[in-house]
Image (cartoon, helix red, strand yellow):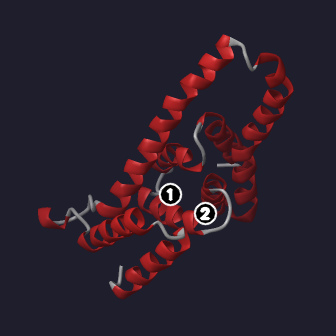
């Protein structure tokens, strides 16, 4: 895979991943599925954990990690630039045209159609991340299919986030500590 291929692949991802950084996840899973082993879904899950706890946009972080994994620093730049380029181009075009078309019924319908697409992509990313975190497809016996320790962390953190609504950094730190304590 050349740097141009990385750029074009992530340009396509950036063009169609409507809904933000997590909406890139289904596209990155597709890259992993077609990667001839240099990228796996498990690696994507690990990259997602790092990308979410790193400063910056999740999609840009994920694309940079994938590019870095395959082609080093230049691959990280090519993938990240490929991902953000469509957004920059589209934002410039929309900013120039929005004043003239903001009341146009076709434009309103177009944006109304984007909302369910974004919800679908984000839902797929959510369920994919949950499956990566909690499901062990390579388990030798049926009762090891669910990663119990990870499921416990998920349930506890979900409850704490829902009940107390503290800053996300607290929960990220707590999950990291729990991972160390539970030797995950």
Task: Say which residue appears at 83% left-offset and 23% top-offset.
Answer: 99
Res. 146 image quadrant = bottom left
Decide if residue 136 is on the left or right side of residue 78.
left
User: Residue beneath label 1, please?
Assistant: 39
User: Residue beneath label 2, please?
Assistant: 69
Residue extending farthest to the top is 105
Decide if residue 9 is on the left or right side of residue 96.
left
* In the foreground, 37 or 27: 27
Circle 1 — which element? loop
Circle 2 — which element? helix
* In the foreground, 8 or 17: 17
Say which label, 1 or 2, has the lower sequence index: 1
Crowdedness near tag 1: few (<14), some (14–19) or many (≥20) residues, C-alpha within 10 Å = some
Compared with residue 38, is residue 172 higher up or lower down, i.e. above or below?
A: below
Residue extending farthest to the left is 142
Res. 42 image quadrant = bottom left
């Amino acid at each position: 895979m050349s740097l141009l291929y990385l750029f074009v692949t992530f340009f396509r991802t950036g063009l169609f991943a409507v809904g933000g950084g997590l909406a890139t996840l289904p596209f990155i899973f597709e890259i992993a599925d077609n990667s001839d082993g240099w990228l796996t879904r498990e690696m994507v899950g690990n990259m997602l954990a790092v990308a979410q706890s790193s400063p910056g946009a999740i999609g840009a972080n994920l694309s940079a990690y994938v590019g870095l994994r395959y082609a080093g620093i230049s691959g990280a730049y090519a993938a990240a630039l490929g991902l953000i380029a469509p957004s920059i181009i589209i934002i410039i075009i929309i900013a120039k045209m929005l004043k003239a078309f903001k009341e146009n019924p076709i434009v309103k319908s177009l944006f109304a159609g984007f909302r369910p697409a974004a919800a679908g992509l984000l839902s797929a990313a959510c369920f994919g991340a949950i499956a990566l975190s909690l499901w062990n497809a390579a388990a030798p016996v049926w009762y090891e299919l669910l990663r119990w320790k990870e499921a416990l962390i998920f349930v506890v953190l979900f409850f704490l986030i829902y009940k107390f609504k503290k800053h996300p950094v607290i929960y990220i730190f707590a999950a990291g500590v729990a991972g160390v304590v539970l030797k995950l």
